Each structure stands twice: as structure tokens, then as C-alpha cells.
Image: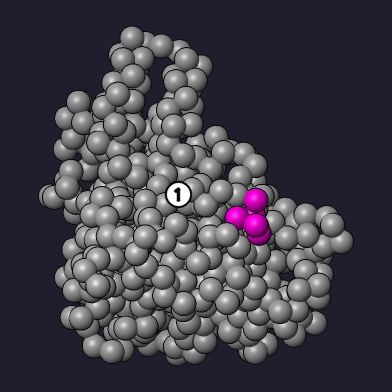
Amino acid sequence: MHHDTEKCSYITLYQLTNINEPMILKKEIYLENQTNYKAFSINNIKEIPQIQKLSEQELFEIEVVSQVLPFKSNSYVINELIDWDNIPNDPLYILTIPQKEMLIPKHFDKIAKLLKSGADKKTITKAANSIRMQLNPHPAGQLDLNVPSINGEPIDGMQHKYRETALFFPSQGQTCHAYCTFCFRWPQFVGLEGLKFASKQLELLQEYFKVYPETTDILFTGGDPLIMNANLLNNYIEPLLTNVDSLKNIRIGSKALSYWPYKFLTDPDAKELLKLFEKVVKKGKHLALMAHFNHPRELETKAVQEAIRLIRSTGAEIRTQSPILNHINDNSNLWSEMWQKQVSLGCIPYYMFVARETGAAHYFNLSLEDIFRIFKEAYSNVSGICRTVRGPSMSAAPGKVQVVGITEIKGEKVFVLQFIQGRNPDWVLKPFFAKFNSQATWLNDLKPAFGETSFFWQEEYEKMTGQNADSFEYKDLG
Ligand code: SF4
């Protein structure tokens, strides 16, 4: 959208280089103010030139909401993603800039009143925290469910829920280049929860794969692990490349391609990062960047397209995923377009998720009925090559539950569901049925169909976890 001349010169020069030996161009060639990362929050929002378009009232609304929910945007999102002629309805604007409706009126008014009355910081934080506690913030202790241990010692910073895959939360990767307004990990960004997953247990990480040889995959997640510099990331990854034969797949969950593609282009460690990717692949491990894209526009800039090309040139694969969200991507054409663009850029559509019941859920959540309709329409409109995507899927505590269909069986309208991943692998791909409910937005809103009193997996789940299934929707991060 902006500075096309500079971008063109960058691209032309880049194209002269060998794709297998990505040359990172000197910063001077690219536009300084684009390649220098700058974060924006409520404290410096007025430094965003485009923000002058907003009225005092709109700015005040952002200020109110950002007292409760995290707010962080950056120069790339502001200059290259948001369409400022389309605010406040622009999906990319809504993606990182808090909106008034993200708080229910009662909560909004409470904070607005305090701000107007000139209340001190402490009073406002106290009120904000009390609101946050009502937004289902995964309170302390509830995340312990999936923490693995070695010799009885829990490994902080890890979760192991599905047999094959371990989640690892590197302590320095628990923030992001910008914050999504819908993020279910919001409590850690507002300081409500400590970094529960803070982990420096490098040695234990290697040990882990010896104790659990059935684990073939590790997912580095956060926040965004690619907020770390390449050297730090290498410290975590390198020990896994030798002597851990059971580990086959290394995945990195990241939104850096969408929020800061210059990470792979012009950041000081860009070259080193791509070299690290190459090293992983050369060691015979599959490296997958699990890239988070919510809207096709995130795939349109020259920067993201070049970044994708460079990453693929290392032998890494890019798999894409996103929740489906009201106000951002609640439209089947947009999903078809997004998957098609991803495929044409060499990415593999992977998941459409149902958004979780947390934070500003009332603003973003759609009914399972609408979600299924959008998924079905989008899926029907693309060729088989895009249909690697799975969904719509709820990452609930018992497992990843897919809405397979809505149908009528013997006069009863039902949701057809199945586990894509289950806490017990035997549950996978065994269909089960819930009474149709047009208001349902998550698994816990669903009741068994055909007069059954529980789902087939429910009793076992409760035995495994000691949790009542009524609460299964909130107790998981997997
Ligand atoms: S990039 Fe991921 S972890 Fe970070 S705010 Fe967005 S959804 Fe949350």
C-alpha cells in the first residue's frame, strides 16, 4: 500500500539472488521506517499519524478498553495492513486496536467513569482486574492439567496432552509483535497471570524425549517464539537435533509472518534464523512453521510474500491456522480466498478453529451453526488442494473436537462431532452426536442427542482429570 518504489527495488534486487542462498539485503536498501520495528500501545498511540482520523471520543474508547484487555500494535500493522479508509470496521484495524464493544457496557462504563474522574492508576488497575476475573482468564492452577513430569518433577513450561505432541513455552517467547484483540492468552499480556510456562529447563527438554519416546513432535509456542532472536531459539532447538531420534517434527507456532515479516527479511538476525531453519531440515527433522493468518490481506504485502518464499527455501513447511471470528473473518468467501492465496504462496491450510470463551468472546464468537455453515461454504468453493484444512475445531480439554456436520437422524436435529485429537487416542474419529442448539458456541453448550445422559468419552475424561465435564471448556491451552 505504501512506499511501493522502495519495495520494488528491494524485490528486484532480491530476485537476482539465489533462492537457496537467501541473501538478506542491507537495511538501507529497504525503507528505514518500515524495517525498524516500532510497537504502539495506549502510551504512544498519538504518535501514529493515521490515528489523527479518530475523534477524541474514539481515542477515549480505546483508552478505556485497553485498561482491561491488552493493546499492542506495530509499525508494520499500522502502515501496511490496516486500511485506514475503512476504519473503524476494517478487520485488520479490529485485529489489534481495542474497540468499545469488546467490553460489555457495564464494564466499559465502570472504567470510563474512573478515567473521567481522574482516578489514580491503582484504583483503575483494581477495577480492571476485577473485570478481567469475570472474563474467564484461566485462573491460576487450572493450567496444571497437562504438565508432564520426569521422575515426579513437573516440567514447567511444557504441556503434554496428546501422546505424540509436546507443547513447549520458551520463557523468552511469551510476548508477540502485536496482540490480537481476540487472543485467549490475553491474561499473560496484561500481567494477570505470571508467565506460567516460563521455562529454562533446557536439559530437561532433551531428557524429556528419552522418558517419553512416543513423543514425535514438539510445538514451540507462546506468545510468539519468534519474538526471540535466532540465537536464543537456536539454544532451545539445537540440543534436539542430535541424540533425540524419536523426535521427528519441530513446529513453531507464530504470527510473525503476519505481524512482522521483516523478522525474516531485514532484522539483524534474519539470516541466522533462516540458517537455523535450514540446519533443522538438514538434520532430517521436519520443520513446520504453524503460521497464524486471520485474513487474506495479511498475505498481500510484498514483505510477507518474500518472507514466505525465504522460509520455504530453507526446506521448512508453512502450515496455516486461524480461529473464525465475528468482525474479522465471518465470511465464507474470505476463507476460500485465504486458503487459495496460502496455497498459491506455497503454504498448507491446516486448521479453522472455533474461538474460545474468554476475553472479548461476546464480541468475536459466532454460533457453531454459523461457523459450520461458513466452513462448509468455504470448503465447497475450493479445490481439493486447499482441503488439507481441518475444522471447524474446538480445542477443548478432552481434545480437539470437530464439527463434522449438522443433520437430522430419526427426526432429531443433531450436531455430528468427532475428535481430531483426543486425550485418549482411542476417541479419535469416533463420531458422537449432540442435540442441535442454535445458540451453542462451544462444546459445553452441547448436550448428548437421542436421550443419552452423557457423551461416550465423558466418564473416562472425568476419571482421567478429576474434572467435571461441565467445566471442560475452560481448562486447557492445548
Ligand atoms: S499472536 Fe497468538 S499469542 Fe500473540 S496475541 Fe495473537 S493469538 Fe495471542
Q: Residue at x 78, y 60 (%)?
A: 149
Q: Count numbered badges in the picture.
A: 1
Compared across the picture, whether 310 is left or right of 164 comes to left
Q: Is residue 47 above or below residue 297?
A: above
Figure colour scheme: one colour
Q: Is residue 144 above or below residue 353?
A: above
Quadrant (top left/top right/bottom left/bottom right) for the N terminus? bottom left
Q: Position of residue 57 (x, y in %)?
A: 20, 26
Q: Is residue 143 magenta?
A: no
The quarter of the picture where residue 112 lies is top left
Q: Position of residue 145 (x, y in %)?
A: 65, 53
Compared across the picture, whether 114 is left or right of 222 comes to left
Q: Helix, strand or loop at disc 1? A: loop
Q: Residue at x 22, y 51 (%)?
A: 327
Q: Residue at x 47, y 71 (%)?
A: 419
Q: What residue does disc 1 label?
A: 184
Compared across the picture, whether 231 is left or right of 435 comes to right
Amino acid marked by disc 1: Phe
The quarter of the picture where residue 307 lies is bottom left
Q: Residue at x 18, y 35 (%)?
A: 54
Compared across the picture, whether 224 is left or right of 7 comes to right
Crowd class of label 1 (few under 14; some 14 to 19; many from 20; radius 10 Å): some
Quadrant (top left/top right/bottom left/bottom right) for the C terminus? bottom right
Residue range of the region highlighted in magenta in the rendering? 462-466
Residue 344 in view here: yes
Closest to the observer, 63 or 188: 188
Whether disc 1's CB lies below 8 Å from ligand 1 is answered: yes
Magenta stretch: helix, strand or loop mostly: helix
Residue 3 in view here: no
Q: Position of residue 424 (x, y in %)?
A: 60, 70
Q: Position of residue 444 (x, y in %)?
A: 42, 52
